[in-house]
Image: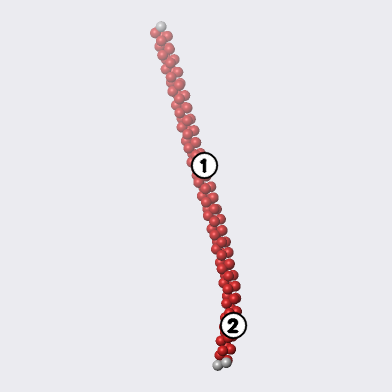
Amino acid sequence: MKTEVLRSIKKTEEECKSMISAAEGDNKLSIANAELEAENLIAKAQNDAEEYRKKRIADAQRDAKAEHESIISKGRKHAADLKNQSGSNLENAVEFLVTRFKGQLNV
């Protein structure tokens, strides 16, 4: 009977060692999986950040180009307005000079 009890204890010890070994293996596998998942999450976050940066730069360039075109358009319109205004002022200036010249001749 003692022998049988000792065998039972020995068998239980071996089973426990086997379970501990399996648990340690599972633990190592879980840690490796967690590390891999963390690396994947970091890589994804870096890719997302790079895509966001590129999008923001493209948006800023597009906005700057639109602003540039708006400024150029306003400048051209202002130049055209000044040219038209100077044309009407030119007629008045010519009339004024002719009148002054005629006045000078009659003196």
Q: Secondary structure at mark 2?
A: helix
Q: Position of residue 61 (x, y in %)?
A: 54, 56
Where residue 24 appears, x then y in whole percent? 45, 26
Relative to 22, say whether 37 is above or below. Answer: below
**Residue in the image at 59% along x and 85% along y:** 98
* Residue type of the residue flagged with mark 1: Lys
Q: Write the residue at 48% across / 30% down.
A: 29
Query: 44 above or below 94?
Result: above
Nearer the observer: mark 1 or 2; the answer is 2
Local packing at callout 2 (Cα closer than 10 Å; few below 14, some 14-19, many 20+) is: few
> Looking at numbered disc 2 in the image, what kind of residue is underneath it?
Glu
Q: In the rendered view, would you say 3 is above or below 55?
A: above
Location of mark 1 (residue): 44
Q: Nearer the viewer, residue 33 or 97?
A: 97
The Cα–Cα distance between marks 1 and 2, rounded to whole angstroms, is 76 Å
According to the image, label 2 marks what residue?
95
Q: Residue at x 57, y 77 (%)?
A: 89
Circles 1 and 2 in contact, beta carbons < 8 Å: no
